[in-house]
Amino acid sequence: MGGARNAARAMAPSRRVMTGLGQLLGQVAQNGPAAALRVFNLQSLVGAPIADVFLALTDLLCPDGGTIDEAIARNAMLETVGELGAAGDLRFDGATPDVLDAVFIGALARSIETKLFNEIGGRSIRLPTDVAAVEIIQRTLHDFIQGTVRDRFAAAGGTLASVPYAGVEAFVQAIYEQSFELIRILGDSA
């Protein structure tokens, strides 16, 4: 894939979507839910269930019918919406900063993991033929991505409120690059 930086650049649709999500959630933390939704022209959703807000944001940031990379971002967002829906009738304007941060971390990690598995399936990344070794790599990758996203998040201050609006894109890019570098190292050493 031409290295971790090029692999991360190839995820432009996912980076764009995760940047938008991070910016919305950061705005909630900094300026409140109503102001954040107004930035994305979603002010009619103030007081709506959190799953409804994220479904509308998904449709806004990654509409149906795009490329595979856009579908990866959409899938990450929709899985997050499904998880939020299963959590009950939590209202967007009642979500705590911890909940919003967890949504961001979960969606970002899902997008990275899905892209990596897509590249593995497309043979851009070579893995060993031993199934047990591949399963170990899969578990290690999942744990690494979750840990990397959490660590980078903590290093940035531990909340989206502490990441400047303009800095969310660089934050997302760095996490993608670190993840792609790990899968390269894991694949080479297996």
Image (cartoon, grey):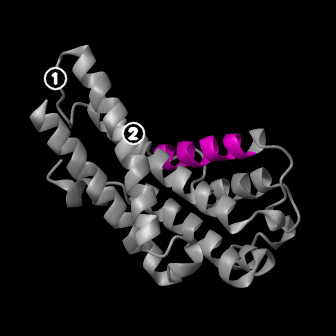
Q: Position of residue 166 (x, y in %)?
A: 47, 82
Q: Which residue is mark 1?
A: 128
The residue depicted at 77 percent of the width and 69 percent of the height is 42
On screen, 138 above or below 116?
A: above
Q: Which residues are magenta?
A: 71-84
Left/right of residue 10 with respect to residue 130 in the rendered view: right
Mark 2 Cα-neighbour bin, 10 Å: few <14, some 14–19, many ≥20: some
Measure the C-alpha gap from mark 2 to mark 1.
Answer: 17 Å
Res 60 → quadrant: bottom right
Left/right of residue 77 with respect to residue 88 in the rendered view: left
Q: Which residue is mark 2?
A: 142
Res 36 → quadrant: bottom right
The residue depicted at 17 percent of the width and 31 percent of the height is 126
Amino acid found under the numbered disc labelled 2:
His
User: Regarding mark 2 in the picture, which secondary structure is present there?
Assistant: helix
On screen, 6 above or below 162?
A: above
Name the foreground residue: 72 vs 162. 162
Q: Earlier in the sequence, mark 2 or mark 1?
A: 1
Front disc: 2 or 1: 2
**Mark number displayed over residue 64:** none
Amino acid found under the numbered disc labelled 1:
Pro
- Tell whether position 83 is magenta: yes
The residue depicted at 63 percent of the width and 71 percent of the height is 24
Q: Residue furthest left?
A: 188
Q: Is residue 8 visible?
A: no
On screen, 183 above or below 168?
A: above
Q: Position of residue 130 (x, y in %)?
A: 19, 15
Q: Position of residue 154 (x, y in %)?
A: 46, 67
User: Regarding mark 1 in the picture, which secondary structure is present there?
Assistant: loop
